[in-house]
């Protein structure tokens, strides 16, 4: 692979004597390298014309070009069928629905259908782009008409659908399981989705780069798929953190030999459970303690502390549909809120105070909106860090100055 070959040659010229037989000796592969020079990460013996080429934009809107071998895709599907469907007691033999980020109808179309039947997969594919309060009843009717047995999709989309079902008093939507992907699921979202579809909610974690994945078992623990890749959790200096501590995910793929990504910085944050932690389900696969979303989806204090999930700020006692927190500066956040019936100034003050309790002295601008924009792929971002490069540098310097004994800790949200 040209990229890795040049990296090692440059190291050797600089007098670096480390060898490539230990994973930790390899350089970190940054996402911008994959974005700008994807073909330089193809294996020398790969045949791109015989591989499946995919473009995925992620949260940036800038496409990543990925090539996957057909064998790798088959193996991934087999793992998915066993771990995601099998653990939940469902299969491809029964009708199921996928609520995702592909356009099915033109965005300006205002009448259903906003879905298409995929006979090969026994799947009703439903686009998340038209999932607004006006059309949610149409989506719900389509689930009933197609006798859907289980649903799968973006957490935010499933939540919006479930919230609409509860508001409408629908009781004809019982499913075997609701499987979330692409976004973390909060306790409140889990409750609403489970209540609407009268079923358990199972969280999954994965990536288009096919380098790591995890599935939630019936006891609520996320189990990693070791066949897919190796996960490292690193601190701001790219050093391993202790199990249970939050850090950035760096992954090494094991399945896609035609385009192997070695020590690839995904852009997500999370933590692994201690290696000896047992699971009541009886499975011995490694346990992902938590996934906190993208590294960019973290708020920062002026002292360098990072704040990930803010679910407790938006507890079920608030009459809101959804909310998004945007950090515009180190001393200012903007909160976009889609309100429900009964929302008033008392609730506004509660949100502001809860944020200040977790972040410290900060200006909070609360903005009531009809809809919160999604990313280019239709995903919802609950937290957006919009700090300038200068402010991010201030945060990094502050983090480095934290005493060694406290480094890696974070403000609990």
Image: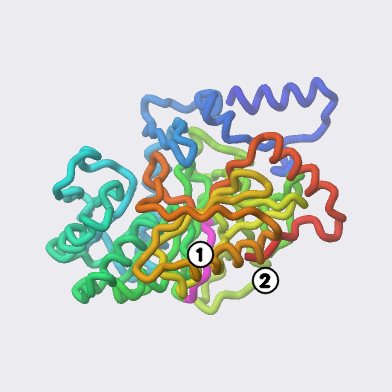
**Residue at 59% of width from left, 44% of height from top?**
328
* Viewer-closest of 60 and 166: 166
* Image point (77%, 26%), residue name: 11
* Res 348 label: 1
Q: Position of residue 264 (x, y in %)?
A: 60, 40
* Neighbours of disc 1 within 10 Å: few (<14), some (14-19), many (20+): some
Q: Secondary structure at mark 2?
A: loop
User: Residue 257: which disc?
Assistant: none
Disc 2 versus disc 1: nearer the observer:
1
**Camera-nearest residue between 302 and 276:** 302
User: Between disc 2 and disc 1, whose residue precedes?
Assistant: 2
Whether 263 is drawn above or below 92: the answer is: above
Q: Is residue 286 visible?
A: no
* The one of 130 and 38 positioned closer to us in this rendering: 130
Q: Could you tell me residue 40's position as x and y percent?
A: 55, 24
Total marks in image: 2
Q: Residue at x 70, y 58 (%)?
A: 361
- The percent position of residue 192, horizontal first and vertical second, equals 37, 71
Image quadrant where residue 208 sits: top left
349 to the left or right of 131: right
Q: Position of residue 13 (x, y in %)?
A: 80, 20
Residue stretch rendered in magenta on the structure: 219-225
Q: Which quarter of the image is occupied by the C terminus?
A: bottom right
Mark 2 Cα within 10 Å, few/some/many (few <14, many 20+)? few
Residue position marked by numbered label 2 in the rendering: 276
Element type at marker 1? Answer: helix
Would residue 223 be counted in the magenta stretch?
yes
Residue appearing at x 18%, y 41% in the figure = 109
Task: Quadrant for the N terminus, please.
Answer: top right
């Amino acid at each position: 692979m040209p990229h890795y070959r040049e990296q090692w040659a440059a190291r050797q010229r600089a007098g670096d004597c480390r060898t490539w037989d230990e994973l930790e000796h390899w350089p970190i592969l940054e996402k911008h390298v994959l974005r700008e020079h994807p073909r330089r990460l193809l294996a020398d013996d790969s045949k791109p014309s015989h591989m499946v080429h995919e473009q995925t934009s992620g949260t940036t809107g800038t496409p990543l070009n990925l090539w996957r071998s057909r064998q790798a895709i088959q193996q991934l599907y087999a793992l998915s069928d066993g771990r995601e469907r099998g653990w939940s007691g469902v299969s491809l033999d029964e009708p199921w629905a996928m609520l995702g980020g592909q356009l099915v109808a033109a965005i300006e179309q205002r009448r259903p259908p906003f879905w298409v039947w995929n006979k090969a997969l026994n799947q009703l594919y439903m686009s998340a782009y038209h999932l607004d309060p006006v059309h949610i009843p149409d989506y719900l009717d389509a689930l009933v008409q197609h006798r859907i047995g289980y649903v799968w999709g973006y957490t935010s989309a499933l939540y919006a659908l479930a919230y609409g079902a509860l508001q409408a008093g629908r009781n004809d939507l019982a499913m075997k399981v609701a499987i979330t992907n692409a976004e973390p699921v909060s306790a409140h979202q889990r409750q609403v989705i489970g209540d609407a579809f009268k079923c358990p909610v199972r969280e999954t974690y994965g990536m288009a780069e096919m380098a790591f994945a995890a599935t939630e078992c019936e006891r609520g623990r996320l189990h990693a798929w070791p066949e897919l890749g190796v996960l490292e959790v690193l601190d701001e200096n790219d050093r391993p953190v202790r199990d249970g501590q939050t850090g950035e995910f760096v992954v090494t793929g094991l399945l896609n030999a035609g385009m192997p990504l070695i020590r690839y910085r995904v852009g997500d944050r999370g933590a692994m459970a201690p290696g000896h932690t047992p699971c009541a389900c009886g499975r011995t696969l490694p346990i992902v303690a938590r996934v906190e979303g993208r590294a960019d989806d973290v708020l920062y204090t002026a002292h360098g502390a990072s704040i990930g999930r803010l679910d407790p700020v938006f507890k079920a006692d608030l009459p809101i549909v959804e909310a998004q927190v945007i950090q515009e500066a180190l001393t200012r956040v903007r909160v976009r809120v889609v309100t429900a019936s009964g929302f008033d100034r008392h609730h506004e003050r509660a949100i502001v105070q809860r944020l200040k309790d977790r972040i410290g002295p900060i200006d909070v601008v609360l903005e009531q909106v009809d809809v919160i924009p999604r990313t280019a792929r239709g995903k919802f971002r609950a937290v957006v860090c919009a700090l300038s490069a200068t402010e991010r540098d201030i945060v990094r310097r502050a983090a480095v100055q934290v005493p060694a004994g406290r480094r890696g800790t974070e403000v609990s949200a």
